[in-house]
Image (spheres, rainbow, N blue to C red):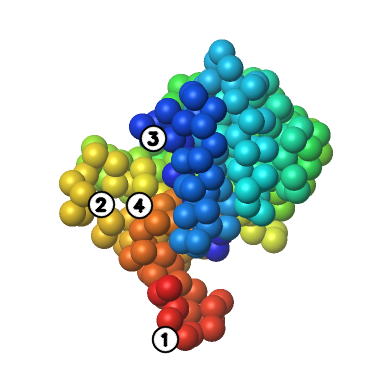
Amino acid sequence: MLVVGEKINVISIEIGKAMKERNPEPIIAMAKAELKGGADILDVNIGPAAKEGHELMPWLVETIQGAVDCRLSLDTTNAAAMEAGLKVHKGKAMVNSASGEPERMHNMLGLAGKYKADVIGLAMTATGIPSDANERVAVAYDIVTACGEHDVPLENLYLDPLILQVSIAQDKAMEGIESVRMFRELNDPPLHTIVGLSNISNSTPPETKSILDRVYLVMLMEAGLSAAIMDPLDRELIATLRAVKIFHNEMLYAHSFMN
């Protein structure tokens, strides 16, 4: 399972300040820490970035890839910023993200096809996140169909059911897991799936956050999850992931497997 590091995010006080000031040091330090912690890809989230996104995203891509050898998930709703980042990205990027909203879907899938990138497809429309797994699958099917229009191979698509906070939508937690199972059945071979894992524990007390993330990750992996945008600096979370891989014979056991 792919680990997509979540920490290079404009909402972080330190990272957001560094982005605004074009200060590379905190961003490079975080990139190195995430990779050391177990990340395979780094999510670079600049949000809508309406004014300077087309300048900020390529600066971030070049700054990070100039310091570490890794793939990046470019995370913004700003299509101009997305393309500016894709133009300078080394290797295969990830577009985060398309959705079922027609303009966003076709803009982002078009960029993914043009730059041969992976792409995350969010199971939501302009009216919001569907309430159950069946409705999410209907949105996902539209995204799958649109991939063919934009020369995006289905192996490059990662479907995201959009996990809701257990603190305010406890009854929807299992819908997210069921969505992962059902997304995989939309194609043979099964489609890739991804979640923003920390969504499940948003607004919960710090002492319960990690255990919620860990248990939910195990449940999602048993449903066939392919990737998660998560905190690679949470050692217990990474250890849980590695333990599941050991039991599935995807990783060779060693006494130091948690390190």
Q: Earlier in the sequence, mark 4 or mark 1?
A: 4
In the rendering, at what x and y percent does residue 139 appear?
A: 56, 35
Marks 2 and 4 sit apart, C-alpha to C-alpha, by 18 Å
| 182 sits left or right of 156 in the view | left
Name the kind of residue labelled 3 in the image.
Glu
Res. 220 mark: none
Which residue is identified by label 2?
A: 209
Q: Earlier in the sequence, mark 1 or mark 3?
A: 3
Quadrant in the rendering for residue 142: top right
Which residue is identified by label 4?
A: 174
Name the kind of residue labelled 4 in the image.
Met
Within 10 Å of the Cα at label 3, are there few (<14), some (14-19), or many (20+) other Cα atoms?
few
Q: Earlier in the sequence, mark 2 or mark 4?
A: 4
Q: Helix or strand or loop: what does disc 3 sit on?
A: helix
Res. 255 mark: 1
In the rendering, at what x and y percent does residue 160 appear?
A: 52, 44
Marks 1 and 3 sit apart, C-alpha to C-alpha, by 35 Å
Residue drawn at point x = 43 percent, y = 73 percent: 259
Marks 4 and 3 sit apart, C-alpha to C-alpha, by 34 Å
Please identify, in this view, whether the residue under mark 1 or under mark 3 is nearer the observer: 3
| 70 sits left or right of 255 in the view | right
Q: Helix or strand or loop: what does disc 4 sit on?
A: helix
Residue drawn at point x = 75 percent, y = 45 percent: 90
In the rendering, at what x and y percent does residue 28 appear?
A: 53, 45
Res. 14 mark: 3
